[in-house]
Image (cartoon, rainbow, N blue to C red):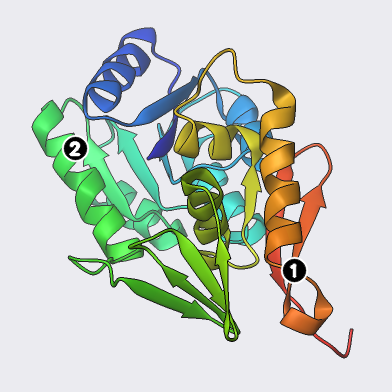
Amino acid sequence: MRIAVADDEDMVRDFLSTILTEAGHSCTAFRNGRDLTSALQRDTFDLVIVDWMMAGADGIHIIKWARETLSPCPPIIMLTSRSDNNDVADALNAGADDYIIKPEAKNVILARIEAVMRRSAPQPEKPPRTETYGPYRFDRMNNSVWLDEEEISLTSREFALALLFFRSPNRAFSRAYILETLWNSVPDLPTRTLDMHISRIRSKLRLGPDKGYRLQTIFGHGYRLELFDGDS
């Protein structure tokens, strides 16, 4: 997963970055609430962890802002030293998905993260071989897509990229998120590589109004697969 962490304490940011990276996640850390909210407007994250007291914007403000502004809003965990029951209630009522009191053991933090993600996006234990979206049927066994009665062959990367979009229609994915998720953040990856894959998916799957889907470029951000409304 791609996780954003905001805390004004260096030791806490380093601790979280270390345990999240060791657990196989990608962690982006921010020193204050202002930088975090700015990043959330231009980038994509699967989970956000925020401290309560920070410069720029405190944790409660960030939670309320995210719930009102981001669509979809990623799950948010409040990680703070404030332990009063009223504080816990205020954070949860503001929209936090969980509340962790500092200091906490790394295995508990990781378990809480997994629990939040299970609640927010439950996944079947074993993904089905085929997934159908409108006229498209994805076959995970051979990386092919059936469009009505026609089989379309995709490379493994094209297949994974297309399925990422179809599983989350109308969700904007940043370029950084896609590259980290599908290319594992290869540092020397040419910028045009993702653009070429997007172009091939559009062409091979013939995405457009007549098929009910269009793959939109969000300039300065990334891409979004939109369900097409024929009346718009």
Q: Circle 1 sits in a helix, a strand or a loop, which is it? A: loop
- Disc 2 target residue: 110
Q: Quadrant of the N terminus?
A: top left
Q: Decide: few, some or many residues near mark 1? Use Cα within 10 Å; few <14, some 14-19, many ≥20.
A: some
Residues at marks 2 and 1 touching, judged by CB atoms closer than 8 Å? no
Closer-to-camera residue (214/109): 214
Rendered image: mark on residue 207: 1
Left or right: residue 119 compared with residue 91: left
Q: Quadrant of residue 141?
A: bottom left
Q: Is residue 152 above or below residue 92?
A: below
Say what amino acid the circle numbered 2 marks.
Answer: Leu
Q: Residue 215, position in %: x, y?
A: 74, 60
Look at the image and tell me whether residue 29 can be seen. yes
Q: Residue 61, position in %: x, y?
A: 56, 44
Left or right: residue 11 compared with residue 72: left
Residue at 20%, 66% in the rendered image? 126
N-terminal of the pair, mark 2 or mark 1, is 2
Closer-to-camera residue (47/57): 47
Q: Residue 70, position in %: x, y?
A: 63, 55
Q: Is residue 16 above or below residue 10?
A: below
Residue at 55%, 38% in the rendered image? 177
Look at the image and tell me whether residue 73 can be seen. no
Say what amino acid the circle numbered 1 marks.
Answer: Leu
Q: Decide: few, some or many residues near mark 2? Use Cα within 10 Å; few <14, some 14-19, many ≥20.
A: some
